[in-house]
Image (cartoon, rainbow, N blue to C red):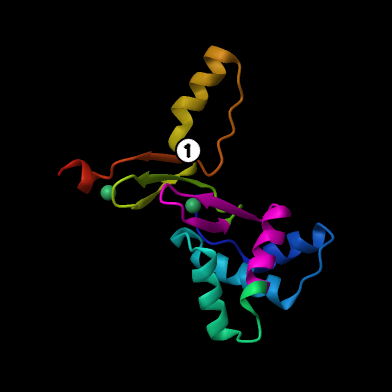
């Protein structure tokens, strides 16, 4: 299931990995917890964060995202149009991205169960797809 993770849990996870909880790390995680399923880009995140925290500079937001990605708390999803978006790693889901209009459909974590079951059965392979992106055409574009 998707949904927003609890901020306290994320901060706990951060400390657990031996990282300090700085203001920037806290506000970036809070913003992601609130908007994870909207797949914000770094620029969008930075703009939202700056409104409430003018003291947190753009470069800090970028550096913080890089740090959080490196520590596994944040996942970076690149979509077909070159946009790089961010969401929490704990927010498990997959993406169907339309090649034509760029629409992003969030798929449940179990969307590829039939495939992973088949891989296990036929190849003994334990697939663990995470934040998969599958491209194609959305219903609206496919209809035209
Ligand atoms: Zn996503
Ligand atoms: Zn489309």
Above or below: residue 6 compared with residue 127: below
* Residue drawn at the location 49% of the way across and 70% of the way down: 44
Above or below: residue 115 compared with residue 77: above
* Residue drawn at the location 60% of the way across and 86% of the way down: 54
Location of residue 71 in the rendering, given as x and y in whole percent from the top left corner: 73, 54
Q: Nearer the viewer, residue 4 or 63?
A: 63
On screen, residue 58 versus residue 143, left or right, reads right
Q: Residue furthest right?
A: 18
Above or below: residue 45 compared with residue 74: below
Q: Is mark 1 within 8 Å of ligand 1?
A: no
Location of residue 127 in the rendering, given as x and y in whole percent from the top left corner: 58, 28
Q: Magenta residues, as a range? A: 60-87
Location of residue 90 in the rendering, given as x and y in whole percent from the top left corner: 60, 53
Q: Quadrant of the C terminus?
A: top left
* Residue drawn at the location 68% of the way across and 73% of the way down: 60
Mark 1 = which residue?
A: 110
On screen, residue 96 versus residue 49, left or right, reads left
Q: How many neighbours does mark 1 have within 10 angstroms: few (below 14), some (14-19), or many (20 or more)?
A: few
- Residue 84 among those drawn in magenta: yes
Kindly state the secondary structure of the residue where label 1 is placed.
Answer: helix
* Residue drawn at the location 81% of the way across and 59% of the way down: 16
Q: Residue furthest top?
A: 122
Above or below: residue 119 compared with residue 105: above
Q: How many marks?
A: 1
């Amino acid at each position: 299931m998707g949904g927003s993770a609890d901020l306290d849990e994320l901060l706990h996870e951060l400390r657990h990995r031996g990282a300090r909880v700085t203001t920037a790390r806290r506000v970036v995680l809070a913003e992601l917890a609130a908007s994870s399923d909207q797949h914000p880009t770094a620029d969008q995140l930075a703009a939202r964060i700056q409104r409430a925290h003018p003291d947190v500079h753009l470069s800090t937001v970028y550096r913080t995202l890089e740090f959080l990605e490196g520590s596994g708390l944040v996942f970076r999803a690149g979509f077909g149009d070159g946009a790089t978006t961010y969401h929490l790693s704990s927010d498990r889901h997959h993406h169907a991205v339309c090649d034509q209009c760029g629409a992003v459909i969030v798929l449940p974590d179990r969307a590829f169960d039939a495939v992973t079951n088949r891989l296990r059965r036929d190849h003994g392979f334990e697939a663990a797809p995470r934040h998969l992106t599958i491209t194609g055409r959305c219903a609206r574009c496919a209809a035209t």
